[in-house]
Amino acid sequence: VFINRNNGTKANALGYDVRKSVAKQCETKKIIKRYFKKRDRGFGQCFINRFDKTYKRSKAPAEEKAAWLFYAEQMVNKDQGIDSWLDISARDAFNFRGADQWDQWKDGYDTLLNHLMANVPFEKIKTNTPVCRIYWDDNNRALVVTKAGTSYLAKHVLMTVSIGYLKEHHSQLFIPELPEKYTKLLDVSMLAVVILNS
């Protein structure tokens, strides 16, 4: 893991190790089940409660503590698809964990696409069609404009672009722009890079 601050200087990797340790603690049944008793105790509360003590025991710099706690929250929010790590109960977070990055489907990514397209007539599916704009609204409809100039009115749009492409082009691709809560999660979706604001 390469860890740099936004000014380009190197950050101390020990804070990353603390975040990783706390995440592991909060994923163990013995610890997380203490948070099952009250429905309003969010999954994030486990992190909040355990982070301070774990950070103090480490040799990570005190001045980076708030940044690492913020990073931990952003990672939980991104992984769970939520706005606040207090919005998901500890029980739900424990019972409905995501698949490991090494888990594979027999037919690869096509498994997901085939499932999503199962009830859609084949002639309605447009593949290998470069898109330049997606106009969307709150009425569950989208107008998709292709680079060839063809437009399609759609109830669903499934994008299969890379995170890097989406991060770079989302503001030009979607009209109106994606909500800030989603773009913030895109901002913390890094590939082997951690940036601390200090």
Image (cartoon, grey):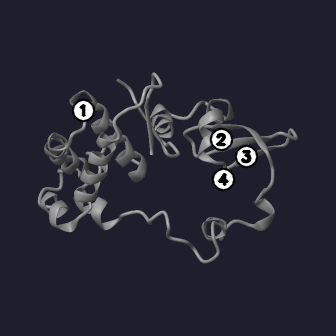
Residue 37, image x, y percentages? 11, 60
Please state which of residues 125 and 22 is positioned toward the viewer in this rendering: 22
> What label does residue 160 carry, if any?
4
- State yes or no: discs 4 and 2 in contact (Cβ < 8 Å): no
Instruction: Say above or below: 79 vs 3.
Output: below
Q: Residues within 10 Å of mark 4 (few under 14, many from 20)?
A: few
Q: Residue at x 42, y 46 (%)?
A: 78
Residue to which mark 3 is pinned: 153
Q: Which badge, 2 or 3, comes first in the chain's sequence? A: 3
Would you say 85 lies left or right of 185 here? left
| Amino acid identity at mark 4 | Thr
- The picture quadrant where one finds residue 97 is bottom left
Query: Residue, x 34% and y 36% (percent of image)?
Result: 12
- Say which label, 4 or 1, has the lower sequence index: 1
Mark in the foreground, 3 or 1: 1
Name the residue rendered at 41%, 52% in the picture: 79
Disc on the earlier residue, 4 or 3: 3
User: How far apart in space, not on screen, are marks 1 and 2 (Cα)?
Assistant: 34 Å
Q: Is residue 95 above or below residue 192?
A: below
Mark 2 touches mark 3? (CB < 8 Å): no
Mark 3 or mark 1, which has the lower sequence index? 1
- Reading the image, the residue beneath label 2 is 165
Circles 4 and 1, Cβ within 8 Å, touching? The answer is no
The one of 120 and 131 positioned closer to us in this rendering: 131
Q: Quadrant of the C terminus?
A: top left
Q: Nearer the viewer, mark 4 or mark 2?
A: 2
Marks 4 and 2, the one that precedes in the sequence: 4
Residue flagged by tag 2: what amino acid is it?
Tyr
Q: Position of residue 44 (x, y in %)?
A: 25, 47
Residue 156 position (above or below residue 5): below
Which quadrant would residue 6 be assigned to in this image? top left
- Residue located beneath label 1 in the image: 61
